[in-house]
Image (cartoon, helix red, strand yellow):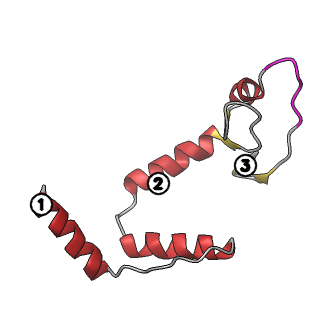
Amino acid sequence: MIDFLGIEKLTLCTCKEPALQLLTMGLFPCAPSEPSLAVDLNMLGFVERLFVHAAPNVTAWCKTLEAFLSERNFKLATRVSNHDHLNLLVLTLVLE
């Protein structure tokens, strides 16, 4: 389980579906059956509000994603510059 205080391991009983037990505890399960991860609903609410109110910054988002994936031994094969992204966006808008 992940919440604002960190990561904690939970033990659930076999009397009810694990996902329902997690939801009852205020946690969102990562899968409907046999979830291996659950996130506090308050944390999800915070992240939702963060993305709603955060200024759009494609460069920061891309660098964060690249760093996050790199820490997990993934590597992006290509990189698109902001200029290329803007041209693609304009081209998409014109073609629609």
State the SS at label 1.
helix
User: Residue at image x 49%, y 76%?
Assistant: 63
77 or 22: nearer the viewer? 77
Residue extending furthest toward the left: 94
Q: Tell me which amino acid carries mark 2.
A: Leu
Residue name at image x 12 percent, y 60 percent? 95
- Residue 52 inside the magenta-drawn segment: no
Residue nearer the viewer, 36 or 27: 36
Which residue is denoted by mark 2 in the rendering? Answer: 50
Q: Earlier in the sequence, mark 2 or mark 1?
A: 2
Q: Which mark is residue 95?
A: 1
Disc 1, disc 3: CB below 8 Å?
no
How many residues crowd mark 2 within 10 Å: few (<14), some (14–19), many (20+)? few
Left or right placement of residue 80 versus residue 47 in this view: left
Q: Does the stretch in magenta take in 15?
A: yes
For the magenta stretch, what is the residue range? 11-16
